[in-house]
Amino acid sequence: MTMAYSIMLAELLETIAVPDPKWLKQARSRLDILTKPPGSLGRLEDIATRMFAIRNGNISVSLNKAVYVFAADHGIVAEGVSAYPKEVTRQMVFNFLANGAAINVLANLHQADLTVVDVGVDADFEELPGLLQRKVRHGSRNMLYEAAMTEDELNSALQVGFEVAELAHEKKHTLIAIGEMGIGNTTAASVITAVLTEQPAAMVTGRGAGFDRNAKEKKIGIVNAVVRKHFALESTNSDPLEILRRVGGLEIAAMTGMVLGAAKYGIPVIIDGFISTAAAALACTMNPTVKGYLFAGHRSDEPGHRFLLEYIGLDPILDLDMRLGEGTGAVLAMPIVESALRLYKEMATFASAGISGAIT
């Protein structure tokens, strides 16, 4: 079965425009006359150029940064694919809200507004500050035996992402990081990666939250089994929505919607590690134009992450052997992006500083 796009999704995909090349050209021209040898700031120059284009040449306003952490549980946890019980998803949501997690420390340090979005945690929460309750269902189904979501559930999870992107637009956020929390979600990301990149399970499946070698081999076997169950026929491999429905987590679907919605509103997004990059890869498969609004915060220690980055065509800003998730790597990259823009905006030109240019 090839699942039809919802009318809303189809309309959204049509509204995503490529950042105007004229801004890219203007940015490169300015960078070449700043008081430095051409290209000497390396990838900072590319980051500044892309940010200048995404913002349509308007970099006079300071960045208004935010990080959105999407949380959901996964039915596949019943197969022993994680070193931690599913209850940890709920417990970590409370930890985020109590300001006790790594993402809280980094978001506070780098002045990024933090919002936790419950898309599918297998628990009920009271109204709590900092928690956006958008639960679609209490965790995904066990993808080893059945599809993780129904079509309606998938559309609802995507809709959550669209709505959060609209909220970010209303709050005038100009740089977004996305992250996640969901015990078992590296298994879902591994299956997505294997299908999208056509790599064997052993190449794209890692330790996740922490495993010994024997347990990792079991996890690889489960990823293989899931791929065989849902994607034995080649015709099922090309539809990103069907991939999401069969094996994606609710938080992965919501992040996919968030990436698409942010691109619609022209908001640059820093994706985090393995899980959020799986969502971004699916979004780019739906509409390759989305890539123009994406930055890869870091390269995760999860082996499948590098295949996803290659699939999208993004180079990571940082490489710190991290595999925590939560949006931590994405928020760590924010000051790099901000530094690139400040250099572009505030450095003197050869002419304004009265400095002689290179001898030609």
Image (tube, grey):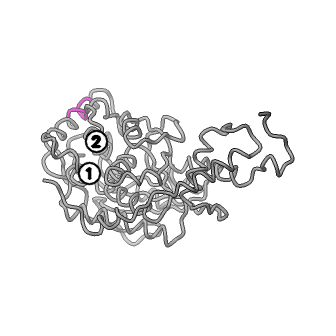
What secondary structure characterizes most of the magenta part?
helix
Image quadrant in which you'd find residue 69? bottom left
Observer-nearest of 119 and 168:
168
Q: State the extent of the magenta-drawn residues as a range.
A: 217-221
Helix, strand or loop status at disc 1 = helix
Q: Which residue is mark 1?
A: 240
Magenta residue check for 117: no
The percent coordinates of residue 299 (x first, y second) are 47, 38
| Relative height, residue 210 to residue 276 (above, below) | above
Q: Is residue 24 left or right of residue 152?
A: right
What amino acid type should be assigned to the residue bearing mark 1? Pro
Q: Residues within 10 Å of mark 2 (few under 14, many from 20)?
A: many
Tell me where residue 308 appears, x and y as whole percent.
37, 40
Please tell me the numbered disc located at residue 196. 2
Q: What's the residue type where badge 2 is placed?
A: Leu
Dot 1 or dot 2: first in sequence order is 2
Q: Is residue 241 left or right of residue 334?
A: left
